[in-house]
Image: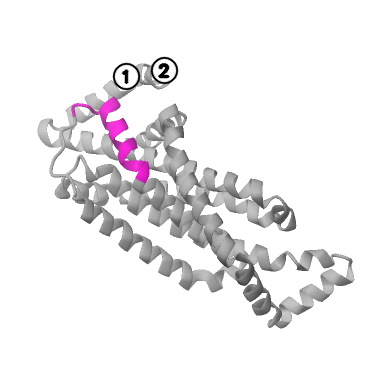
Amino acid sequence: MGLIFDSFWRALAYLWMPRVIALSLMPLVLMMAGSLILGYFFWDSAVAWIQQGLQSFAVVQTIIAWTESIGWSGLTAAFGPLAVLLIASPLVVISSLLLVSAFMTPVMVKLVHQRRFSGLSVAQPASFWKSAWWSTSSTLLAVVALLVSMPLWLVPPMALLLPPLIWGWLTYRVFAYEALAEAANREERDALFLRHRNTFWLMGVVSGYLGAAPSLLWASGAMFIALAPVLVPLAVWVYTLVFAFSSLWFAHFGLSALHRMRLERTSGTGAANASVRLDAVRTVTDVEDISR
């Protein structure tokens, strides 16, 4: 567990480096451009389609009649836009994750490699196409899981459990692989995935719940609809920063685990324990370097 927390605070410190903040603007710009284009062409038709679909359910009609009877007639107009945002939320999360993986993760992994593990040799890195296939196949599986589980979201506890678990699985699959793709060979990647599978999953689930935090904005209902031009960019940037942090977390953890595994194989567990002590000694120096 010590390695998890050590990697966590280091990732949090690296997240606020000016270089990382600047990198986060690229996914933000791309996400906002895509949202504006899709909203311009499909927003009205999507809202109308959702409203027609909702009105076909007797339960929805009962809720609408009740809200109108207590003077909340304006609330019914927000059902359609809010439903569209709720449906689009998983797509926004996945898009943010993939954009961070494509534009930020390689740079941040190299940053961690150069600053903390400059002596860690590169051994048969994974090809670009293999990394792309890994991310694409993992994303497709996550999308299928989201679609299959959507009916269960109507059960309140499941709506809070299933999406973060699925996003956490996708986060761990993508970022753990990317963290090791450059420095580790296939045998080392397989060994680390097997050794730290539960830890990677835990880190992914934590990242998934952090990634779900901006979705609470959607739950503010009509107030969010009124403030959407301000809150949507803020939510997208928060998504970007959350996944940038997750990428750094997996980079610090994965490279540390790779370093220790190589020491274990070459010099026995004593060298690995010595490396742990050396990491503790270098912590103060690392903090000073980050603050520069």
Q: Kindly identify which numbered label has been placed on residue 123.
A: none
Q: 60 or 195: which is nearer to us?
A: 60
Q: Which residue is mark 1?
A: 282
Q: 120 or 97: which is nearer to us?
A: 97
Q: Element under label 2? A: loop
- For residue 108, which quarter of the picture? top left
Determine if the magenta segment contains residue 68: no
Quarter the N terminus occupies: top left
Q: 225 or 244: which is nearer to us?
A: 225
- For residue 250, which quarter of the picture? top left
Magenta-colored span: 103-119
- For residue 85, which quarter of the picture? bottom right
In the image: residue 270, left or right of residue 235? left
- How many dots with numbers? 2
* Residue in the image at 74% along x and 58% along y: 222
Q: How is the image coloured?
A: one colour
Determine if the magenta segment contains residue 118: yes
Report crowding for label 2: few under 14, some 14 to 19, many 20 or more residues within 10 A (C-alpha). few
Q: Element under label 1? A: helix
> Mark 1 and 2 residues: CB-CB less than 8 Å, in contact?
no
Quarter the C terminus occupies: top left
Q: Amino acid at mark 1?
A: Arg
Q: Which residue is mark 2?
A: 292
In the image: residue 278, left or right of residue 92? left
Principal secondary structure, stretch drawn in magenta: helix
* Residue in the image at 59% along x and 44% along y: 234
Q: Position of residue 40 (x, y in %)?
A: 58, 61
